[in-house]
Image (cartoon, rainbow, N blue to C red):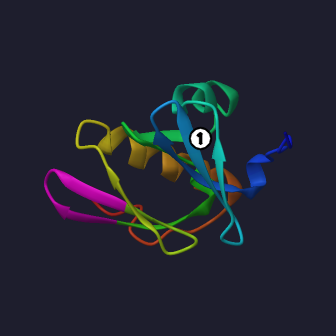
Amino acid sequence: MRKNNLHTNQILYIIGAGNYSIVHQVGGRHLLMSHTLKWYQGKYPDFIRINKGALINPTYVVSWQKTSRLLASLTMQNGQQLVIARRRMLNVLEQVEQTLFLVGKQVNGLGNNA
């Protein structure tokens, strides 16, 4: 069995698949890992849980779109759009904005009235 060492700067986002997770990396690589999203959430505290099935690395967020009062999504660096759970929307957008402010990155959509 091959051990994959994951570095936070290589992970775009992680999608849950039951007791497994699919780790989406920079460069288009995908890894099926035998850990749950909850495990990754504890291991990578700077990542943000945007819904029941997804955990993102906020440094790779390019923009966000609010399509209705209760629906918003994030666009990741690879072009993938991920839906934000309505109950997490304000908290997620604040966390993304705060993280990107700290690294000095401007994101389309952030700073607007959410």
Residue 78 percent coordinates (x, y): 57, 73
Residue 41 percent coordinates (x, y): 58, 30
Residue 72 falls within the magenta-colored stretch: yes
Residue 24 percent coordinates (x, y): 61, 58
The residue closer to the viewer here, 59 or 12, is 12
Residue designated by label 1: 47
The quadrant in which residue 112 appears is bottom left
- Tell me if mark 1 has few (under 14), some (14-19) or many (20+) residues whose alpha carbon lies within 10 angstroms of its own: many
Give the residue drawn at x 24%, y 36%.
Answer: 87
The residue closer to the viewer here, 54 or 96, is 54
Above or below for 19 versus 73: above
Give the residue drawn at x 50%, y 50%.
Answer: 96
Residue 77 falls within the magenta-colored stretch: no
Q: Secondary structure at mark 1?
A: loop
The span shown in magenta is 65-73
Give the residue drawn at x 45%, y 34%.
Answer: 18
**Screen quadrant of the C terminus:** bottom left
Q: Main secondary structure of the magenta part?
A: strand
**Screen quadrant of the N terminus:** top right
**Furthest residue to the front?**
1
Residue 17 percent coordinates (x, y): 46, 41
